[in-house]
Amino acid sequence: MITATAYLNLALAVAFTLLGVALLLAVYRVLAGPSLPDRIVALDLMAMVSAGIMAASAVASDRPALLDASMITALIVFVGTAAFARYLEKGGR
Amino acid sequence: MLDYFAATLLVGGAAFMLLAAIGVARMPDLFMRMQTSTKANTLGIAGVLMGAALHFADAASSARALLIIAFVYITAPVAAHLIARAAYLIGVPVWEQTRKDEWHEKQAAAGDQPPSNPTY
Amino acid sequence: MIRIARILGLMAWFAWELILANFRMARDVLLPLGRLKPVILAIPLEPGDERLLALFSNGITLTPGTLSLDVSEDRRYLFIHAMNPGDVERFRCDLMRDFLGRIRRAVS
């Protein structure tokens, strides 16, 4: 049985790796497209993954204030996506 | 004990976010990409945040975490709906393996101009 | 009181469906794509209740293999994208009876 701190550190390392790979895959989709909505979906995912990374950083650095950053990211991403959808319906590509 | 649980939740949430990203990178059309991204993504962020809340185990961060989770669960389907609808209407192609498209049929039957959604 | 219990019941059932949805999603994402047979379906709606419609369409997006796309202009159909429904008619039936029925019983 490993100690709680060691387990948490290991978990954080794994979580950061997974989130990092997720971010890279999302970047791939942003670059690859092929259509604008695809890129929007991927950007949305990127922002959510960043919010996840911020929450994990909050745990890693023991600073709960970073959860606020995570919260704001999750909030504004919705507004951005809604604006993009509006733009799409008005005929943007 | 709580810390083990928090760490496991963090990893689980991160794994689901990775799953969402794999889906977004791998799925053949927009609608399937959106399916993976909205579902796995919301559960992923919920897992990570619950892990963080358990780690700090105080009222302020738990309240924040719960607030974000609730907000994400309310907005994610709405955002997905907005994008999916707009995308379909501007004619984003549907995967060629899609067996049936009743939306297209219904619009054609109503005499509207159906959006031309070519398959890949 | 009974109403609150019902809504809580709906939420518990929904949380369970949500987790189930994600594991199914994991399977769909990781296995070869040839297994998937997506369809776009029209789900007939009963006219009237906007609240029901909102809950239903948002719930659909979060549960197994479905994504809501649009409501037809006459509000008679909800169009959804289903990832891997198997038999289409049975899938539609299940969705309407289980999901819509549950929500209707909980909110009405």
Image (cartoon, grey):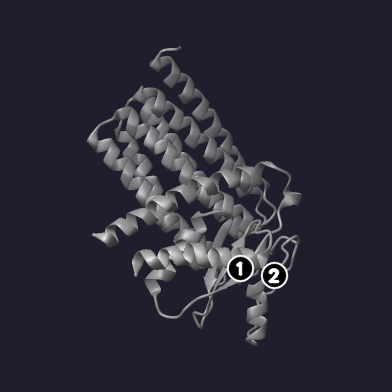
- Which residue is drawn at the image coordinates 49% and 30% (left, top)? B11
Residue C45 picture location, percent across and down: 50, 76
- Which residue is drawn at the image coordinates 50% and 29% (left, top)? A16
Mark 2: few/some/many CA within 10 Å (<14, 14-19, 20+) = some
- Which residue is drawn at the image coordinates 62% and 59% (left, top)? B31
The reply, left or right, for residue A90 in relation to residue C12 is right
User: Which SS class for mark 1?
Assistant: helix
Viewer-nearest residue: A17 or C82: C82
Q: CB atoms at circles 1 and 2 under 8 Å apart?
A: yes
On the image, numbered disc 1 is attached to which residue? B88
**Is A83 located above or below residue C45 in the figure?**
above
Mark nearer the N terminus (1 vs 2): 1
Disc 1 residue type?
A: Tyr
Determine the chain carrying the residue at label 1.
B
Disc 2 residue type?
A: Asn
Residue B25 picture location, percent across and down: 64, 45
**Is B42 located above or below residue A59 in the figure?**
below
Viewer-nearest residue: C46 or B104: C46
Per the model, the C-alpha gap separating discs 1 and 2 is: 8 Å
Residue B7 picture location, percent across and down: 43, 26
On the image, numbered disc 2 is attached to which residue? B117
Q: State the quadrant of the C terminus of chain A.
A: bottom right
